Structures are given as structure tokens and as C-alpha cells.
Image: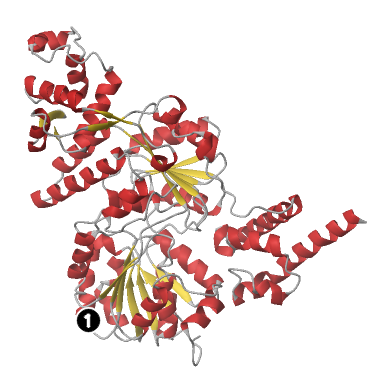
Amino acid sequence: MHDNTPSALSILKKRFGYTRFRGAQAEIIAHIQNGGDALVVMPTGGGKSLCYQIPSLLRPGMGIIVSPLIALMQDQVSALVQNGIRAAFINSSQSAHESREVMQRAAAGDLDILYMAPERLVMTSTLAFLSQQQIALFAIDEAHCVSQWGHDFRPDYLHLSLLAERFPSVPRIALTATADGITRDDILHRLAMGSATPFVAGFDRPNIRYRIVIKNNPRRQLRQFLESEHPTDSGIVYCLSRKRVEAFAEWLCDQGYRALPYHAGLPASTRRENQAHFLREEGIIMVATIAFGMGIDKPDVRFVAHMDLPKSVEAYYQETGRAGRDGLPSTAFMTYGYEDVVMLRQFVENSNAEENIKRIENQKLDALLGLCETTSCRRQGLLGYFGEEHPGECGNCDACLEPAETWDGLIAAQKALSCVYRTGQRFGVSYLSDVLLGKHNERIQQFGHHRVSTFGIGTELNNKEWRSVYRQLVAAGYLMVDISGHGGLRLTERSRPILQGKQKVLFRKERRGRNRSGSERTTVVKRQAVVFDSAADRALFETLYQLRDRLAREQSLPPFVVMMDRTLEEIAVKKPINRTELAMIHGIVERKLEQYATPLLETVEEHLRKLAQQDI
């Protein structure tokens, strides 16, 4: 129910348990409250949801939230209801009777917020129904789905432009965590929001540690990463194909981890069941294609590991952003290799997209390769892609923590490029490396390349080092992968100055030993957000943790919907002894105070009583 004279700040505290806004939240909320349209680009975990949830409570009527995934709707509605907000969703998981009940609540004015999928919203019957209701706003979440330049284009979003025609006086807010300049322009154009005010918050996620390593036995690399940094944590492992998802999930289970697969080839019931386990239980690793994760609200995902190269910097940023939504230290780990580049180039070439879209997708892949091969701060490169500067080195990526050594690679580059030319610009890295190393194998003899001038001139480097040279030349744009053939390399115009000796070339030295896995002990991410002053405080936290799990199971809710880790940690440190003190804890809103004050305070009281007995 709306207050007579509500303010954004009072709702923030009363319904969401926060005492102040972050960044541009207050400005965005005021803009929407006053009837303005907005495009909001804000990093995952930055508080995008509040930018439409609070105006939905401030403005008369009901906020309509367009969301692409059933799981996202269900989790957000569960969290809102826990906070005492009248919210519901309509989607394909419901029976016809359940959907009718929600519509009846909406018609009776008994809802503040209603979530629905884009395809449901644009149905003639839904639009006719909404035209008879008082609508506070339309929020289009994951708005990059409308853009053909975005990394997760969904045709259903294209029809949302009709909202401008059917509801011209209702403010609209489009939100995304990931959109470069061309994608932002496309979102505004396709949603008919040309007059919307853009709010582009900073893209930095300082709690995420970025680490990118060359693929070298990826299973061993993943095992070392998990053992040294996240042995019991929840996380997501992304793979490029369904087959690799199944294989990695099975292998992780064999290694003693709780791992589940997720991809579009599984039955819908299996996907729903696996996702529910991931959201409601601790320590589960979801192994998935990019079909999984968008809009997932689980705040305690401590790592995201890519076993294959994503499609673009936007995709990488969006997927890694699913780690550490609660602001606690988390890791983005990725292995990649030359074979990934060939496969992704082939995906682009074999798609049915128009040529200009293929060109943009190849450029986006080039930008991601540049990020992978950079010798400077990863965060600077990542933020720079989105037009944001980072002052100095971040100190929380592998390039800053373990700076890469470089070497003068002009001569090696000339040899590598000349070998591509001398062999006809149609062979891949393995064959070219064999020619440079002077190997007399059957294929080289067959093609007569034992007689070219570059045969055997590269014995100063080994096969792995030549592969690194070629990979870095591709990443820098001096060579291109000919995906119309079998992944052969071709010279580009940019290679000419190198062949003429007019351009300096620096290559990154490959790390040796344990660094290959990215699992040096000096870079281990510490999960614990609070350093407890005593073992007793830690014991209280563990007890509260178990209490939260029990309360969540009783209500069939994910634990984080009942209470965040940060809330439990603060209770363990401050030990509130009454409702007034408990209400001051981060995340304890009025509704949760009503529901959980008794068991929480009883747990603290019992803990203090045991401590007092030990002191006697």
C-alpha cells in the first residue's frame, strides 16, 4: 500500500533496508517519478532494480516490469514479497487459473509491481487489459536484448516499441548492465525512446579479480583454481558447446564437487530443477553454456570461470558480472586458445546474419582478443572498451599482480609472417610452426614446403612459443583467420610495416610453472568479508547461517532471499539484543523484522548465555 506522502529515501529504508542511495540511483528515481523516460546502464550488483521498483511504489498505479527469464521474475518477486511489497508475475510456469488470479489482483489495485515476459506483454489481450489499468511505469530489464549489436539479441524485444504508441503518457525505463555506444543508440532507436535521458554509471566491479590464462590442459587449470581459491564456493563454469558442458560437469563430480549441467539441449524440467538447486543450495557449481545466467539474482556466486573464449567484451563483462553481486571478493577466471578464435570466427561466418552485422561481430571478437593478450591492467582495458578511464593500475587483476614480461619480437614476427606468405596463406598455426622448426613430416614434403626460404629458420623458439607468437599476431590484427577454409592464416595490410622492419613489435612472455593455471598462492581471493574478532563471533555467524537455511527451506525460498550474508555477519559482530537494535542492521526491513526478529534474537541471546557460562 502506498504511503500518503512517501519519499524515495523512506521507502529505501522501510522496504529495502538501505540507508542511502548509491551513485545516480536517487537522480534516476526522481526522473522516473516525474514522468521522464530513461536508459540506465549500470553494472551488475549496482542496484538497477531499485531504479524501477521504488518509482513503482512512489507513482500511482502498478509498475510493469518486462523480464526475459522465468527464474529472474520468480526470484525478484519472492524477494519483494519478503520485503512486504505487493508483487507478482505472469509467465508460462503458471496454470491458467494462477494467471487469472494475478490479473484479478491487478484489476483490483492489489499489486504494486507486476513482472511479465515480453511475448506476454505484447499479446493483444494483455495490452487491452493494461489499457484499463493505472500504470505507474514500464521497465524493460536486460534491454540489450533488443539490439542486433548486443550479445544476447532476442526478437521478442523488438515489439516493445509499441508501448510508446499505446501508452504515450507512461514513463519507460530501459536497463542493462552491458552496452557500448552503438548498442545504447540501437536500444533507444528500437524501443522508440529517442527522447529518453541516458544514465551511464561506472562499469567498474572492483570486488572482481580478473585472471586470463592461456589454455593448457583446462581441466587441470580449473582444478588448481578451485582447490586454491574456491574449494567450497558456488560458481559458474561456462563452456562453448553442450558437449563440453556435459563433460566438464561429469568430470567435476568425479573430482568431488557438486556440479550440474545447464544448456538448451536438456529437457526444460531438468534445467528448472538444476537452476533451483543452484539458487537454493550452497556450494553448487553450474556448468553451462551462455543460455544460463542472465538475470540470476544469486548474490553469493564467488567465481565465474570461462573454459572457452566468449563472443565479445560485452559478453565477457555480462557473464563475469554474475560473480560477487553482493560486493564481496570474487574471481573471473578464463582460459583461451587459438582454437577458440577459429571456432568463433566460423560461428560468425556460418550465421545467417547480414554482412554488416558479421563485420561488427568480428570487430567485437578482435577487441576481446586484445583484452586477452594485453600486457597492461585488465581493468583498464575492460573499462576502456566502454569508454571509461581507470586511474592507474587496479591492483586486482593478474596483469597487475603478476606483470607479464615482454620481449622484442620484430625478427620473430617477420619470420612468422613470411612463413604465412611463403606457404600460400592457407595453413594453420600447427603447420606453420612445423615449417619454421624444419620438421620433415609427410604433409610438408607433400606440399614441397621443405624447399621454401622459411623452412627451419625458427629453431630459436619451440612449438609452444611459435603458437604464442601467432596467437598474439592474430590478436593484434597483423594476421586474420580465413574461416572460409580450414582456419588458415592470411596477412593483413597492417603486417606490411613489420615485414619492412618499420614497426616495433613486443610479445608477451608466457608464464611458466604454476602461473600457467593462474593459481599462485599470492593471488588467492579471500572470501570472508568480515574478519571476526573472535572464534565466538565466527561460531555465532555459523549458527545464524544454519538458522537462515532452515527458514529458507520452510518457505521454499533461496537462502539469500531470506537474508544476505552481509546481514548475518553484521548480526554476529554487533549482537543486537532487542528489536530496536536489530532494526539498525543492514538489510533488516520492517517485514523481515516482523518475520524473523524472534528466532534471530533468540539465537543471539542463546549465544551470549553460553559465553557467560563459559566465563563463570
Using the image as rendered, state which of residue 268 and residue 340 is in the foreground: 340
How far across and how far down the image is residue 434, in percent? 20, 15
- Residue at 44%, 47% (x, y): give it: 395
Residue 133 image position (x, y, % from top left) = 34, 85
Quarter-of-image position of residue 557? bottom right
Q: Which residue is mark 1?
A: 166
Residue 567 percent location from the top left of the image: 61, 63
- Relative placement, left or right, of 522 versus 90 is right
The reply to whether residue 292 is in sight is no
- Label 1 CA crowd tier, 10 Å (few <14, some 14–19, many 20+): few
Q: Is residue 276 visible?
A: yes
Reply above or below: 356 against 66. Answer: above
Residue 338, given in percent of the width and then of the height, sits at: 26, 31
Q: Residue furthest right?
A: 616
Tally the marks. 1
Q: Nearer the viewer, residue 241 or 233?
A: 233
Mark 1 lies on a secondary structure that is helix
Query: Identity of the amino acid at label 1?
Result: Arg
Task: Tell whether 413 sits left or right of 23.
Answer: left
Above or below, 65 against 496 in this view is below
Q: In which quadrant of the rendered image does the C terminus lie?
A: bottom right
Q: Residue at x 29, y 75 (%)?
A: 38
Query: Does 328 sit above or below residue 605?
Result: above
The one nearer the camera, 116 or 501, is 501
Could you say which quadrant of the image residue 283 lies in?
top right
Vertical order, 19 against 248 (above or below)? below
Residue furthest bottom in the image: 4
Q: Residue at x 76, y 70 (%)?
A: 577
